[in-house]
Image: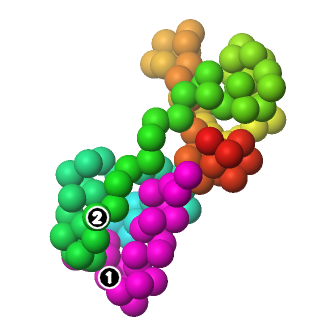
Amino acid sequence: MTTFADQLTAALKGVKMSRSELARRIDVPRCSVSDWCLGRHQPRQHQVDRINEALGTKLTLSRVITSEMVAEALGMCVDTLHRAMRNGQLSDMGIVIPSPSGKSFSYRFFPKVVAEKCGI
């Protein structure tokens, strides 16, 4: 699977544009473009539309990666995956976001890392 990060990095190289220049053209912080290129985050669809306009491309967002998909690829149950993430054992694969009350958590995976490690 080609991740959005891979698509964006290739597109920037193809048009010989820096991350800073793209950030300026679409009016976002440079760190946002860097995060997108590194697979840490994905832009919102309206940002993808602006990226495509600025680069003259047709980039598409990567599909959503669920805990179930990652757990299956790693050969573990979802509860074990979540526990490992909360304990910091898989911090390279995503982040744990506690609810305001701290009683529940959500999990966001880094698409590029998960694609490389799990083939998802």
Q: Quadrant of residue 68?
A: top right
Work out whether 25 lies above or below 72: below
User: Disc 1 designates what residue?
Assistant: 21
How crowded pointer 1 is (Cα within 10 Å; few <14, some 14-19, many 20+) is rated as some
Secondary structure beneath disc 1? helix
Mark with earlier residue (2, 1): 1
Q: Position of residue 25 (x, y in %)?
A: 22, 76
- Tag 2 near tag 1, CB within 8 Å: no
Work out whether 109 lies above or below 5: above
Direction from residue 80 to residue 54 in the image, left or right: left
Q: Quadrant of residue 38?
A: bottom right
Which numbered marker is on residue 58? 2
Residue visible at 51% across and 55% down? 3
Work out whether 91 lies above or below 26: above
| Dot in front, 2 or 1 | 2
| Magenta segment main secondary structure | helix
Secondary structure beneath disc 2? loop
Q: Please state the total of marks drawn on the protein image.
A: 2
First to last magenta residue range:
1-25
Q: Quadrant of residue 14?
A: bottom left
